[in-house]
Image (cartoon, helix red, strand yellow):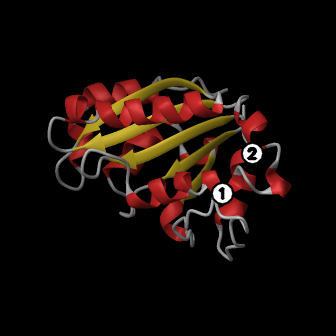
Amino acid sequence: MKIAVFHGSTRVNGNTEYLTYQAVPKEKGTHIYLRDHDIQPIIDKRHAPEGFPVVEDDHTQLIDQLLEHDTLVFSTPIYWYGMSGPMKTFIDRWSQILRDDSYSHFRVALKEKNVYLIIVGGDHPRVKGLPLIQQFKYICEFYGMTLKDYVIGQARRPGDIVNDQVALTAASTLIHID
């Protein structure tokens, strides 16, 4: 199993990263920190006759990494009841990839992917994070991916995630890594 973890947090060594490492230790997967990459926002040209312009950033390199793995983990703090900005920008650009002739295999390739989600929030995340789980469920359904499972952690301040034993235990058994 080849695992790619897409980290959406802008905080280095934050609660979301800590919880994610319980599921996929650093040495057991390819950890990709979206904060370290230049991903330009989408300029929607889906219906323009000229189509999408070429964007000089890291997005296609990230898509190439995504496609090389069979298991995808999306790790994001809950920001205003949704995913982080870097994660949202990364996924928004998938609309552009769908129309890129050099990625004509993108949608078909995603159908073979298993997806896991790890999210952390501070204010009743096991309730207020459910819309984010639903959003990823819809994303997965759109592409034919399988959302296998998720973990929601609670942490208000840096380092607080160590107090959420339920989430730590759930993360440690989330993915069966050989």
Q: What residue type is labelled 1?
A: Gln
Q: Which residue is drawn at 38% across and 24% down?
A: 170
Q: What residue type is labelled 2?
A: Leu
Whole-percent x and y of residue 146?
60, 24
Mark 2 Cα-neighbour bin, 10 Å: few <14, some 14–19, many ≥20: some
Q: Which of marks 2 and 1 is nearer the N terminus?
A: 2
Residue indicated by mark 2: 67
Q: Is residue 102 above or below residue 24?
A: below
Label 1 SS? helix
Residue 74 in the figure: left or right of residue 163: right
Residue 81 in the figure: left or right of residue 21: left
Mark 1 Cα-neighbour bin, 10 Å: few <14, some 14–19, many ≥20: many
Label 2 SS? helix
Looking at this view, is 18 or 105 the one in front? 105
Q: Residue at x 68, y 77 (%)?
A: 56
The quadrant the C terminus occupies is top right
Residue indicated by mark 1: 96
